[in-house]
Image (cartoon, coloured by chain):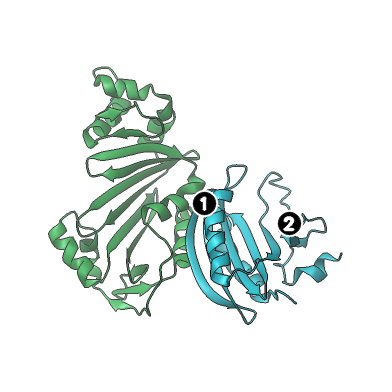
Amino acid sequence: MIDLSSPGAVRLDPSGFEALVAAARHGSAGAPAEAKEALADERLDGVMSVMLDPAAVLRLVVAGPDTRLEHRGWLADGVLVLLLGVRTDLLQLMKTPPAFLPATLVRLTRMRPRHLPERVPAQFAAARLDELVSPDARLRAPALAEANADFAWRLDFWWDGGGRSLTAVDGDLGLRFAYPDVGRLVPVTNTFGYRVLSTVMAST
Amino acid sequence: MDATADARFTPPPGWELADDRPTGVESVALEPADPDHPGRFRSNLVLTSSTTGGLSFSDWQNGTDELLPRMLEDYLLVDLERLVVNAHPGGRRLAHHAGPGGQALTMEQWFTQIDDVGYTLTATVETYRYDALAEVLAATAASWRPGT
């Protein structure tokens, strides 16, 4: 499914996205009609070329005990293409100026001011960080409970020659970053978190 | 009126205090223009004061929180905290918004109320430069002596 009927971002399901990428990569001859139509849509001008030949790629997983959303991004030539997970079966494809990536990440990670209690670092084994954002809720839910977190997120950003990865948890105890080298979840301010997110692209 | 005397804060090194400023604005400090990027957004600090009309500190700031999303495009509040500003109860907020030229901007604001006057020091920078400037802006805020 590729929905071009509504204004704004293009909405599609995972199979529609795969069809779109295949049509862009191999040519639209023989592609499904909706993929051909989508490639001709002006909202996708300059989008597929960035996705097929990006200078940098990002993936953000935001996961609670019951829900898990994956967002993806491709960066090239001053264009940031985002594939946002609205639901597990519904995606939103859009482009935005790269300068707005930090704000997008703030929104997607639901970073917001909270009234916070006294906070201290907590032990959390590095080997279990993947469980916080695991596709398997049977692993994810207990890991989040052990971390005293409402939800977690994992940001991976990589480019030719390098990459960065960051795992965080959030909830009533506020934003905490995972420091795998010491096996700890360390409380940070939103300002600190924002500074980190604002530098994600700097390394590229 | 002498801009330096009115500033009541120490601007970052090299920034200039503007003599020409709008009504209600006590001080404006601008980072130096970049000759290599003449159209680039110039980071700035703006100091304002206004009567709070008998409002408590909390009510004044709650009103500000309601007003900012209506004034600034794509406004996104990131952080908000209470803190002491020059021995007066105050606070700090960090937000993202879109500038008039479509820039991605970060706004950091320190504020306090003394008697019936609300004082606000607002820093605005392009978001991709915020991390590099954050410490300098914090030092400027620490130098601020509102109401003196």
The residue indicated by pointer 2 is B32
Q: Left of A14 or right of it: where is B33?
A: right
> SS for tag 2?
loop
- Specify the chain shown as cyan: B
> SS for tag 1?
strand
Q: Earlier in the sequence, mark 1 or mark 2?
A: 2
Q: Amino acid at mark 2?
A: Pro
Q: Residue reaching furthest right?
A: B1
- Specify the chain shown as green: A
The residue indicated by pointer 1 is B75
**Quarter of the view holding residue B108:** bottom right
Q: Pointer 2 indicates a residue of which chain?
A: B
Determine the residue positioned at 72% across, 71% down: B10
| Residue B68 percent location from the top left of the image | 56, 55
Give the CA distance from mark 1 to mark 2.
26 Å
Determine the residue positioned at 69% across, 61% down: B46
Residue B4, placed above or below residue A108: below
**Quarter of the view holding residue B7:** bottom right
| Residue B121 percent location from the top left of the image | 65, 65
Residue B60, placed above or below residue A81: below
Q: Left of A199 or right of it: where is B137?
A: right
- Give the crowd class for mark 1: few <14, some 14-19, many >=20 residues within 10 Å: some
